[in-house]
Image (cartoon, rainbow, N blue to C red):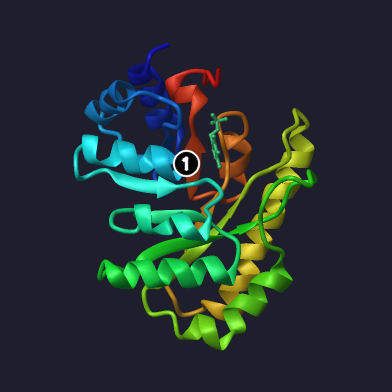
Amino acid sequence: MGIKENLEFYGKHIPEHVKLVAVSKTKPISDLLTAYECGQRIFGENKVQELANKQPQLPTDIEWHFIGHLQSNKVKYIAPFVNLIHSVDSLKLLKEINKQALKNDRVINCLLQFHIASEESKFGLDVEEASQILNSETFASLSNVKIVGVMGMATFTNDGTVVRKEFNHLKSIFDTLKKEFFQNDIDFKEISMGMSDDYKIAIEEGSTLVRIGSAIFGARNYS
Ligand SMILES: *Cc1c(COP(=O)(O)O)cnc(C)c1O
């Protein structure tokens, strides 16, 4: 199946309230353009350099999402154009995003990334850490970042029961934060969860943003 057919499939199988982030990491500009020509406007990348390199080569009405682990010293390269950073996992990073957003006279939308998988290696906060950030005076002083929701990655497993439980956990984290910190904030509404292999479960558990790469563009070649 080609990119066009794959996007048509998701167009039919993803409900209206869920947005599709086409994860284009490692893929050439020509593949992104093909997707663009099919109407796809949201693209996700996980490496700063690759994103900063691709962005100027593509149409300006693309919404760029950064989905990978972000180091503070690299925020400046994507701050002029990035639309949503999915992977905020510290106050230090949030401060730097705010600083660079201010320089560019923008407000940058962010998601707090939570550790929901059983693997040690995956980045992310727990509720306690997130509460500390959201309660801090530093956070209250950041005028150029906006927290619009949460993100998480499930354990890499074929066991749907495990994956469902983890996504359900992320939904409950979202609900807790909504109630405690964002009750009257209509912009806090995004739950970024679900990839090629688990997007169906993610949508059933409340996802509003699915990040799909290989099922649209084909398997990645890292060699
Ligand atoms: C690569 C990546 C995806 C997409 O993964 P696929 O399995 O190819 O759909 C989604 N989210 C993040 C954070 C990624 O790094």
Q: Which residue is mark 1?
A: 47
- Compared with 20, 223 (above or below) is above
The residue drawn where x is 64% and y is 45% is 153
- Determine crowd level at label 1: few under 14, some 14-19, many 20+ residues with C-alpha closer than 10 A: some
Which of 213/91 is in front?
Answer: 91
Q: Is residue 176 left or right of residue 61?
A: right
Which of 181/135 is in front?
Answer: 135
The residue drawn where x is 69% and y is 43% is 154
Question: Does residue 198 show up?
Answer: yes
Question: Does residue 188 show up?
Answer: no
Is the N terminus in the top left, top right, bottom left or bottom right quadrant? top left
Where does residue 29 sit, x and y in percent of width and height?
30, 26
Q: Is residue 126 left or right of residue 218?
A: right
- Compared with 10, 175 (above or below) is below
Q: Amino acid at mark 1?
A: Lys
The residue drawn where x is 34% and y is 58% is 79
Where does residue 137 sit, x and y in percent of width and height?
55, 88
